[in-house]
Amino acid sequence: LKLVQLKDVVAMEGNTTCIYEKGVIPVQRCVQKLQEIHFNGSITVEHHPFDRSPAEECQQNFELLKTWTSPQSQRTRNR
């Protein structure tokens, strides 16, 4: 496994993406599981709304992803 694309969706039966933590996918928990298995590949943000530019929301997702993968976040969780 070398690459993981993370996206959140509004509903399980659809493919409408949304900002992390606003949909039904436990994205942060997925990141934690990747860390537990010592995944050292790339993680990318996947978000493709069809009614607007995804740029700002992708940046928000990226910032959340950086927070979840930071060494500080990992130490806090291991306590």
Image: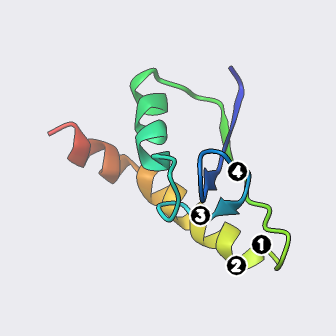
Seen in the image, is 74 located left or right of residue 35?
left
Residue 62 visible here: yes
- Left or right of 76? Residue 49 is right
Q: Residue at x 68, y 20 (%)?
A: 1
The residue wearing badge 4 is 14
- Of marks 1 and 4, the one in the foreground: 4
Q: Is label 2 or label 4 in front? A: 4
Residue beneath disc 3: 61
Which is nearer the N-term, disc 3 or disc 4? 4
Q: Name the residue under label 1.
A: 54
Residue nearer the viewer, 8 or 34: 8
- Dots 1, 2 in contact, CB < 8 A: yes
Q: Which residue is drawn at 43% across and 30% down?
A: 33
Mark 1 secondary-structure assignment: loop
Residue annotated with mark 2: 56
Residue 58: give x, y in percent of width and height: 69, 67
Q: In this view, does 54 lie above or below 14?
A: below
Place residue 9 in its image quadrant.
bottom right
Is disc 1 in contact with disc 4, using a CB cutoff of under 8 Å? no
Q: Which of marks 1 and 4 is nearer the N terminus?
A: 4
Residue extending furthest toward the front? 13
